[in-house]
Amino acid sequence: MDARMKRSFNDIQLKHIGRIFGHMVRLRATVGAVLIVALAGSALLDPQPWRLAWMGTLVVCALSFFVYELRRFNREQFTARTVPTNLLFGVVFLHCLIVGTGGLASPLLPLVIVLAFVGAIGLPRARHVKVFLAEMSALSLLSVGQLGGWLPGLPLSFLGSPPRAMLIAVAVLMLLLLVLVNALGVIIRKTFDDMLIEALAQRDELLATHRTYTRALEALSGEIAHELKNPLATVKGLTQLMVREAGRAQPAERLEVLSTEVVRMQGILEEFLNYSRPLVPLSVSSVDLAALCDEALVLHEGLAAERGIRLERVGTGPVNAVCDSRKVKQVVMNLLHNAIEASSQGGRVTVDVGGTSLGEARVSIQDEGPGLPREVAGRVFDAGVTTKAKGSGLGLTVARALARQHGGEVTLENGAGGGCIAKLVLPRELPADTLRPVPAREVAHAG
């Protein structure tokens, strides 16, 4: 646990324990004071001089401490030392009350277990050890003193004097219960501490992801503004020319340029929107990836023909996976489009559909282009990173986000014989946690 998380951990604990302690201090100063006086009054039923003096002194000390702690709490509020101090006082005061009301035969003896449990779950390990040692020492001294005959006359006369064997059994049982209750309290305390630490770690991770996502959006906003500036200037210039030449010529070529630039701006904005909004929940069904890839190939035949690229599909038989066909098709289309654009004139793009050794579904798309440049190979999935002259650098980021929403993965690597191999791997069955919305920012920096 780093220093920042430790501070948050301690602050949260102090806040909630302090709220509980504040209620306890006020309750103790009112109801507790009445109970202490009533308990001390019971000593009048067994009017031994030492008992009257002992209980009277305890009443004075207890009421003084209660009033002091209430005033101190109202003045200074809660501090890290407040609980240990009060628990140590509680251990000493409770055992003094037990001595005055019968020792091992006191009806207050079970309260030792209650106080021990409160200390075990309310104190961190270092401070709890001190309180636990104080509890064991106080109970051991009381047992040895009473059983050894050094503290005669402890039992209350109106309750009778229990046999020695019973007192020995009570002493052994209380010591064992004290150990067990402290161990149980420590386990419960550790469980809640671990839960709080895990929650804080998740919070910090989400905050870090949010900061990263914000920085990425800030950078992309600047890049998109720059990307849109040039086509907008082109549109503006061509529009002005068309206005001036409207009566003299058919501006067919300029209209074509305008259309191209508008489509380019639309594509940039669509990719930015896909990146900036969360991925919507999946709509899943059993999908044949081979048939899906065949559809993608048909849709790209025109683009491939323009560039003189030959498309080839290998692999036989259906390859089924439970997935969102629309989103997986978007991933395949993106990877296939990139492969065609990366290929040189007369090249070939191969789409291979099959399975992995782990039983997953796999789609591999290999081109015969120059491959990934070394300077961007490790950052190709980062938002804004692209090798295209007019690319936005968001297509692969969104593709990986969609694949990971399915519990799958998208990877890019250079082939042994040249070119680049893009692989989409999907599980045959979706993991249980993939049917929820997943922010695209969660994968923005995974490359």
Image (spheres, rainbow, N blue to C red):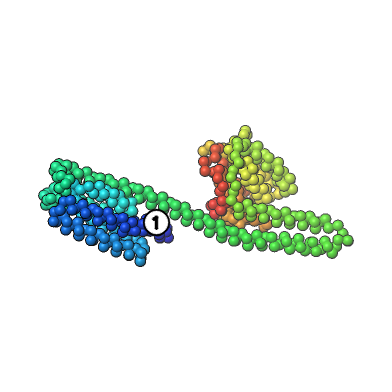
Whole-percent x and y of residue 320? 59, 36
- Asked whether residue 84 is in view, the answer is no
Looking at the rendering, which quadrant does residue 245 occupy? bottom right
Which residue is situated farthest in the right direction here?
248
**In the image, what residue occupies the spot 32% across and 64% down?**
71
- Residue 169 lies, in percent from the top left, at 18, 42
* Residue 257, quarter of the rendered image: bottom right
Give the left or right position of residue 51, taking residue 201 as reference: left
For the point 73% across and 57% down, which residue is it?
Answer: 261
Quadrant of res 281: top right
Instruction: Return the residue nearer the eye: 362 or 76.
Output: 76
Q: In the image, what residue type sits under mark 1?
A: His
- Residue 177 spot, x, y in % from top left: 25, 45
Front residue (pair 201, 402): 201
Q: Which residue is mark 1?
A: 16
Q: Is residue 187 above or below residue 428?
A: below
Q: 75 or 408, which is in the foreground?
A: 75
Element marked by disc 1: helix
Q: Is residue 341 visible?
A: yes
Position of the N terminus, as image quadrant, is bottom left
Q: Is residue 327 left or right of residue 241?
A: left
Label 1 neighbourhood size at 10 Å, few (<14), some (14-19), many (20+)?
few
407 left or right, relative to 77: right
**Could you tell me residue 58's position as x and y percent?**
21, 58
Figure disc tally:
1
The residue at the point 41 percent across, 53 percent down is 197
Which residue lies most toward the top here?
317
